[in-house]
Image: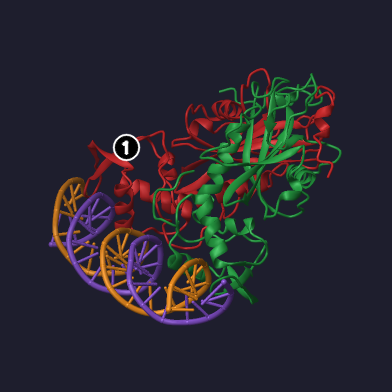
Chain colours: A red, B green, C orange, D purple
Amino acid sequence: MKATQSESRFDPQQIERPLTTVDVVIFTVMDECLHVLLANRPDTPDEPFRGMRALPGGFVDVQKDTDLEGCARRKLLQKTGVKSPYLEQVGSWGGSKRDPRGWSATHVYFALIPPPPTHAQNRDATWFPIKGQGVTVKLAFDHAKLLEFAIQRLRNKVEYTSLPAHLLPEEFTLSDLQRMYELVLERPVEKSAFRTRIFSANLVEAIDKVRVGPNRPAQMYRLTHPNEIVFFPRTFSPRRASE
Amino acid sequence: MKATQSESRFDPQQIERPLTTVDVVIFTVMDECLHVLLANRPDTPDEPFRGMRALPGGFVDVQKDTDLEGCARRKLLQKTGVKSPYLEQVGSWGGSKRDPRGWSATHVYFALIPPPPTHAQNRDATWFPIKGQGVTVKLAFDHAKLLEFAIQRLRNKVEYTSLPAHLLPEEFTLSDLQRMYELVLERPVEKSAFRTRIFSANLVEAIDKVRVGPNRPAQMYRLTHPNEIVFFPRTFSPRRASE
DNA sequence: TGAATAGTGTCTGTTAGACACTATACT
DNA sequence: AGTATAGTGTCTAACAGACACTATTCA
């Protein structure tokens, strides 16, 4: 066995470096449907996939960005104006073929932001509804694959975490929260079991406010620990999980 | 909101590129204890962390490696000679401060390999027992943190997946398998519940062989689908999960 | 026969899911 | 009063965990 770290014998300033990018999958809920924010590729001749839709993202800026997550937050702030959403890394994908400009590695994050996300609706970026495993438009690069992984991750974690709470404003009713779960999971959730679950996890605390409407007013809640994500001991329907 | 992909306006051949590396956390079980393989940093004057222990890994080679996972497999094969172990990405970490040679991003994978791993025991790489959240030696770069994340990921997934099966040879007894779970989780597992779980997941199939010893012989099994990992509907002890 | 491990049977507490029921507002 | 949604109570089936029991080999 040779087992050498042969590459590191070379001067790292000399070796050929891959391109390094960050892409962000930004989710929100609008019109009773999960949406993702997509940017337009620049329409200049020297750009690959010109004019197509793509995940918002781009090259790491070694001057501005102190780390990868900072880079993701910067891009998120640029596109949405949201400062501290839920943000989580999905993974990284790298290879020689995914970008015509050369060997590249991208670091994919997903973010959940509360409505109304209209401020992010402009010429550069548009919300697209999620249908099944992706969107109906073609995406640049391997972004369709990246999006699919992000959706998968989201759906899986929703089965056993408090993630959907981050798709809501700070104050919400339990029915609001339940609807978020149902929208992401694309299946109904039983009300009684849902409430037991939420309360026994100590996920929310009641506030001194009710939502009024043409029916019985609903108690409003906020997250007990807004910056933590809560893990439930079981999945919603004891079915096979994946990933 | 400006919301531009300003970086991509520049020629990507011009922008400053981070260093790109892959590190692999290779686990195995020896002497009733989980171990990780660590390499020695080269002992040459111009290398950072010279002579220290580090996770096996190094720069992506844009000539040899077609993608990140291929790069991880190449390093794994170099160090251990194992061709197709269980391999999973843990995530990526990048920033300006983690490598003195400049802005760098590393892609971390973890691998599970069956015993006996003695072939990987040489001057370049040594097995170290996992104690708690890491090893007792100091590690180069931010590798202690990377290792901690990998251990955490492993322990969490062991609660609800068939991962430990990949720490065993192809043929094993149920007691072997149970011991793997107990070693990784660092807690005893109830035999009867364990067996029910394994069988109802259709994880293993009996083979026409028994292991003999100074006691009742044990039925031997192999994985029903060696290349899939199985997810159980619940965690082992219905306790709070994390990550 | 005893030691040691393999493997099974039974009981019990917890809880998710189903579903029906009650509560409270507005029109 | 009727409607719509909020919120609760009850039953049941499933199952993890505990633990005791039986089984089978070798020394």
Q: Position of residue A105 (x, y in %)?
A: 72, 36
Q: Residue at x 47, y 64 (%)?
A: B194
Coordinates of residue A172 in the picture (x, y in percent):
33, 40
Specify whether A159 is left or right of B217.
left
User: Relative to the observer, which residue lies in front, A91 or A151?
Assistant: A91
Disc 1: CA contacts within 10 A as few (<14), some (14-19) or many (>=20)? some
Kind of element beneath mark 1: strand
Q: Is residue A26 left or right of residue B125?
A: left
- Whether residue B188 sits left or right of residue B59 in the image: it is left
For residue B22, above or below residue B185: above
From this view, report whether residue A104 is shown above or below residue A198.
above
Horizontal and vertical percent position of residue B196: 47, 69
Q: Is residue B220 above or below residue B8?
A: below
Q: Which residue is mark 1?
A: A222
Please determine whether, in this image, residue A153 is positioned above or below residue B5: below
The residue positioned 70% from the left and 40% from the top of the image is: B126
Residue A155 visible within the image: no
Q: Quadrant of residue A238?
A: bottom left
